[in-house]
Image (cartoon, rainbow, N blue to C red):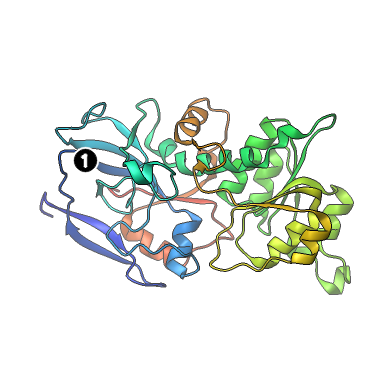
């Protein structure tokens, strides 16, 4: 392959993914070209592929945003970055090279522009977790559990995917009592390893449990929570979250869907607050969590690399998207130069 060409994934339409050979990006004076050494598949990426997410990304590299890369070319006007630096906050990352920066949902950076973030103290795989860790910190902060006085705060996480599992660790480390609902056993077991009380929503069958639901079981064994996080992106799960939250307290909706129906009467009677955190940016206090997340990763307080289920090449990633196995995988990492 020519030095001016690269391999990349292309997502031309829903349920379509292709491995292509295309031209390597050419940078301008204010840009940086990076080799993508590691990129995680996010639930957003799977949703884009399946057509359930509002984001579309039809260019080479797709929406890939959980990236760890290395600078190979630096524009003449760029300061603070040099070839060989480890970089976070790259976009269009399902490719061997990218000059894009992950700015979607990042607050002021969308207007002013942004450069990748240099973190030479972190491995490429650790850098891939910067975005999900930042999202998890944002969710935890928007819950505002520090307003709870005189008792230990309680949180319920509905959906223990990668961000749900990272969020659970952050909350436990902050002294919060946490319960989680998740249908897949290996995710429940991982959450239980750091103190989360887990429930399987798929285990409540009428032939065994009658009319009793997993929501009833959580109320019985754990109780109502000061915050319930909806991490799945399904309307029925939002309804369950509203049922599980303590009157007057918060439901945080992070799961993505194109349209949502809110049960007005239940929310009104309970005085429920519904909060929609953005991605890595807290609009309420104008905080961008990229640097917070990278510092937290560097602290080694979180189990992150343990979330990785598979490492695959770009060629193998086509099959991974086509047969994405939520039951067996937590986080899949693509290594574009594998």
Q: Is residue 102 visible?
A: no
Q: Position of residue 229 (x, y in %)?
A: 67, 50
Please report the residue visible at 30 percent of the width from the left and 56 percent of the height from the top: 61
Position of residue 319 in the picture relative to residue 133 (left or right) = left
Q: Position of residue 49 (x, y in %)?
A: 43, 66
Q: Nearer the viewer, residue 27 or 322?
A: 27
The image quadrant that residue 12 belongs to is: bottom left
Q: Nearer the viewer, residue 150 or 174?
A: 150
| Category of crowding for the residue at label 1, using alpha-carbon neighbours closer than 10 angstroms: few (below 14), some (14–19), many (at least 20) | many
Q: Secondary structure at mark 1?
A: loop
Q: Position of residue 162 (x, y in %)?
A: 56, 48
Q: Is residue 82 visible?
A: yes
Please report the residue visible at 57 percent of the width from the left and 36 percent of the height from the top: 303
Position of residue 305 in the picture relative to residue 188 (left or right) = left
Q: Position of residue 84 (x, y in %)?
A: 24, 30
Position of residue 49 in the picture relative to residue 214 (left or right) = left
Total count of labels: 1
Please report the residue visible at 85 percent of the width from the left and 74 percent of the height from the top: 207
In which quadrant is the N terminus drawn? Answer: bottom left
Instruction: Say above or below: 314 vs 179.
Output: below
Q: Nearer the viewer, residue 323 or 245?
A: 245
Instruction: Say above or below: 126 vs 23.
Output: above
Mark 1 = which residue? 31
Instruction: Say above or below: 173 vs 261.
Output: above
The image quadrant that residue 158 belongs to is: bottom right
């Amino acid at each position: 392959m020519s030095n001016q060409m690269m391999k990349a994934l292309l997502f031309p339409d829903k349920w379509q993914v292709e491995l292509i050979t295309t031209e390597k990006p050419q940078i301008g004076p204010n840009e940086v070209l990076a080799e993508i050494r590691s990129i995680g598949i996010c639930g957003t990426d799977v949703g884009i592929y399946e057509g359930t997410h509002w984001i579309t990304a039809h260019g080479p590299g797709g929406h890939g945003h959980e990236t760890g890369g290395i600078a190979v070319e630096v524009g003449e006007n760029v300061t603070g970055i040099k070839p060989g630096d480890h970089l976070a906050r790259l976009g269009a990352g399902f490719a061997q090279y990218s000059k894009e920066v992950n700015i979607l949902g990042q607050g002021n950076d969308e207007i002013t522009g942004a450069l990748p973030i240099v973190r030479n103290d972190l491995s490429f795989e650790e850098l891939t977790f910067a975005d999900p860790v930042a999202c998890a910190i944002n969710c935890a902060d928007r819950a505002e559990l520090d307003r709870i006085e005189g008792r230990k705060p309680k949180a319920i996480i509905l959906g223990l995917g990668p961000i749900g599992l990272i969020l659970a660790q952050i909350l436990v480390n902050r002294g919060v009592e946490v319960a989680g609902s998740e249908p897949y056993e290996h995710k429940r077991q991982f959450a239980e390893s750091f103190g989360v009380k887990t429930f399987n929503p798929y285990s409540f069958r009428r032939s065994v449990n009658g009319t009793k639901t997993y929501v009833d079981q959580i109320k019985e064994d754990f109780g109502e929570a000061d915050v319930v996080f909806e991490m799945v992106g399904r309307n029925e799960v939002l309804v369950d979250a509203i049922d599980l939250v303590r009157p007057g307290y918060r439901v945080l909706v992070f799961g993505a869907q194109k349209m949502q129906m809110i049960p007005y009467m239940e929310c009104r009677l309970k005085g429920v607050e519904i909060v929609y955190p953005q991605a890595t940016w807290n609009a309420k206090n104008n905080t961008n969590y990229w640097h917070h997340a990278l510092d937290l990763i560097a602290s080694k307080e979180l189990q992150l690399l343990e979330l990785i289920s598979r490492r695959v090449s770009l060629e193998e990633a086509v099959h991974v998207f086509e047969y994405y196995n939520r039951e067996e995988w937590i986080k899949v990492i693509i290594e574009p130069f594998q």
